[in-house]
Every structure is written in C-alpha cells, then in structure tokens.
Amino acid sequence: MEMTLRWYGPGYDSVTLEQIRQIPGVHGVVTTLFGKQAGEVWTAEEIADLKKTVEDAGLKIAAIESVNVSDDIKIGTARRDEHIANYITTLENLAKNDIHIVCYNFMPVFDWTRTDLARVRPDGSTVLAYNQDIVDQIDPEHMKESVEKMSNGFVMPGWEPERLERLKELFEMYKDVDSEKLFNNLVYFLEAIGPVCEKYDMRMGIHPDDPAWPIFGLPRIITGKESIEKMLKAVDKPYNGLTLCTGSLGSNQNNDICGIIEAAKGRIPFAHVRNLKYNNPRDFEEAAHLSADGSMDMYKIMKTLYDTGFDGIIRPDHGRMIWDEVAMPGYGLYDRALGAVYLQGLWEAIKKNQQN
C-alpha cells in the first residue's frame, strides 16, 4: 500500500507540494494536467514538465487523476474514434514518463454532485453534503451559479467553467443515451485502449458514480457490486480495473463496501478511502476519516483491502474544512493530512497484528 495525496497542479491548488511532503508516510501525489480539455492529447513534454515539478519538490507522481473521457466517447458521436486515438496517445506519453495508473470516470454531464459544499457540522467544521430532496427541486441547467458561489473561487474538478457553460447542450446530447448504450460505449472504449494498456502495463481504474444512482434523468452504470462485476467481466483483462471510492459507493447505504473489495480482488489499482455520515436515506454528509465521526467502518475497509492483497495506491479523500483554512471545498490540507496518517495507522496495526 502506498499513501498519496491528490494535488491539482500549479495554479489550481492552495496546497503546496512542500506541505504535502511533510505529511508522514506520503511520498507521492495523484495529479493531472488540470487545464487540459477532455479529448485533447497530453504531450510527452507537458507530462515531463509536470513530473519534474513534482520530483523537484521531493515527491513522485503515483497516478493520474484524471485523464478525462470526452462526452463524444461516452455518447458515441462521430468524433468518438478521434478522441479515443488521442486518449491512446496520452496513455503512451504517460508510459514514456513511467506513469502507469490512470483514474477516469464514465459519468454523463456531472462527474459528481453535492447540494452543499460547506455544510456546517456541530464541531464548526464544514463539509460537502448531499440532500436528494434539494436535488429533486434543482434545475440542473442552472447549477453553474450555485457551484461558482460555493467554490471559494477555486475551479472544481468536474465542474470546470467550460463544462458548466455547455449544460443545456450536454443534456440535449445525452437525451437518447440510456444505461445500456452508455455501458456499451464504455466497453468499446476499454477494448480500444486495450492494446496500448497491455503494451505499457497501464492500469485503468474507473471511478464509481457519485452519488451511486441516476440523477436528473441521466444514466449511471458504475453504482455497486453487480455493475462493477459486470464491467470487470465485460473486459476481463488486468488493465481494466476499479478505483475504489468508499465515499461514492457508500453514498448508497445498501452497498457493501467490503463485499465490493472482495469481488474486485486483484483489480483495484487505486483506492479513495473516506467516511460519510448518514442522516437519513436521502441525506448524507462527509465526515472525518475517523470511523467514529461517521457511519462507515474504516478499520473493516482497510482490513479487507489488506486481506485481499491490495498493493496499490491510496489517498484520503474529501476532507473537512477545519482550522480556518480557505481552500477548494473537500481538498484542504489539514483534514486530509489527518486522514492520511489515520489510515496509515490502521494499516500498520492490521499488518503487525497479522504478522504476530
């Protein structure tokens, strides 16, 4: 297991590489070329520059999150094959820079959805939160204003300005895309990138849908154990894997996270481990990584990863905003640093207990 922290790159992140390096046990980051648009080629030179920036700070790039998949690929437009060819070139260029793990998602329009980016908790911290009753009343084509208002001036991943400007157009593009068509387009994409992944030992980890159910009439296809098993079997190759996100999968209280880990054994190159607090079946908020602060058993999750032979990379996921920090919602330094150390402490205890 290798502990990392997500870093959005120069000019996009309030957290510095120098700060990340001071977190005990964290020697790498998960990062991206944040300014690139889905469908564009990442050049070898751009990747090398990013890699040098990270390595000059005494860290390494452990994985890329994300090389975004374009809507043309997800929908299956006439430009699909062009964008897949660009994606393949990007994977080749990552491999040339010795980067072999890529996280991506196949969610239509919205990469993730929350109704509040700063819900105040009893301890005074603020967190990302979701309430289905509010979502049911939202006009999704007018979410741009609310996201910009809540983002502390930061560009939110999955909610980039270029994307928000096209919401009406995107909904129109997806009007004839159901879950079956979306899944078939995912399989088409995975089969197309297969040769380059196998040639360069690339490991792709699809991120689960967040939340793990359809919203705004849009299909969702990576929502739980059954759909994950279907995806892994459809392209039953080592390069086709899962980015385990306990928060995304845990948004559906019926999902058995440990059962999903066992079902995807050997196919999880990357894990986002975080905690949620369930307030009712239609409302959840993100919590500290400590099990007692939320509704999820972090010890049991980490032990299941250990017991199934997980040897990939982990990062703490969305943190609370604490200690007067002003940062991208969910991605401040302090609470994620606490989470990284806590998760490593669990892993150390589990490992030593097994050895004894």
Image: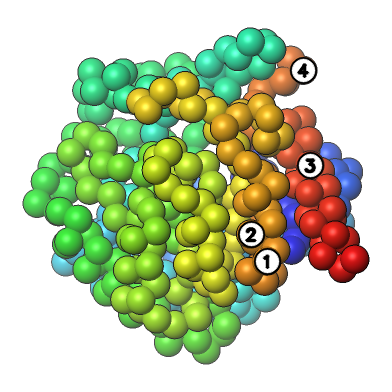
Residue annotated with mark 3? 342
Asked whether disc 3 touches disc 1, contact meaning CB atoms under 8 Å apart, the reply is: no
> Real-space Cα distance between discs 1 and 2?
5 Å
Bin the neighbour count of mark 4 within 10 Å (Cα to Cα): few under 14, some 14-19, many 20 and up: few
> Real-space Cα distance between discs 4 and 1?
36 Å
Q: In the picture shown, does residue 25 fall above or below 235?
A: above
Residue annotated with mark 1? 307
Q: Residue furthest front?
A: 356
Q: Amino acid at mark 3?
A: Tyr
Q: Secondary structure at mark 1?
A: helix
Q: Which of the 4 quarters of the picture holds residue 327?
A: top right
Name the disc covering residue 315, or none.
none
Q: Position of residue 116 (x, y in %)?
A: 45, 20
Q: Which residue is painted at 78% across and 35% down in the image?
A: 338
Numbered circles on residues, count: 4
Q: Secondary structure at mark 4?
A: loop
Q: Position of residue 238 (x, y in %)?
A: 50, 80
Viewport quadrant of the C terminus = bottom right
Residue annotated with mark 4? 323
Query: Is residue 178 shown left or right of residue 72?
Result: left
Q: Amino acid at mark 4?
A: Trp
Viewport quadrant of the N terminus = bottom right
Query: Is residue 228 shown left or right of residue 18?
Result: left
> Real-space Cα distance between discs 4 and 3?
18 Å
Q: Secondary structure at mark 3?
A: helix
Bin the neighbour count of mark 3 within 10 Å (Cα to Cα): few under 14, some 14-19, many 20 and up: some
> Real-space Cα distance between discs 2 and 4?
32 Å
Residue 212 seen from this side: yes
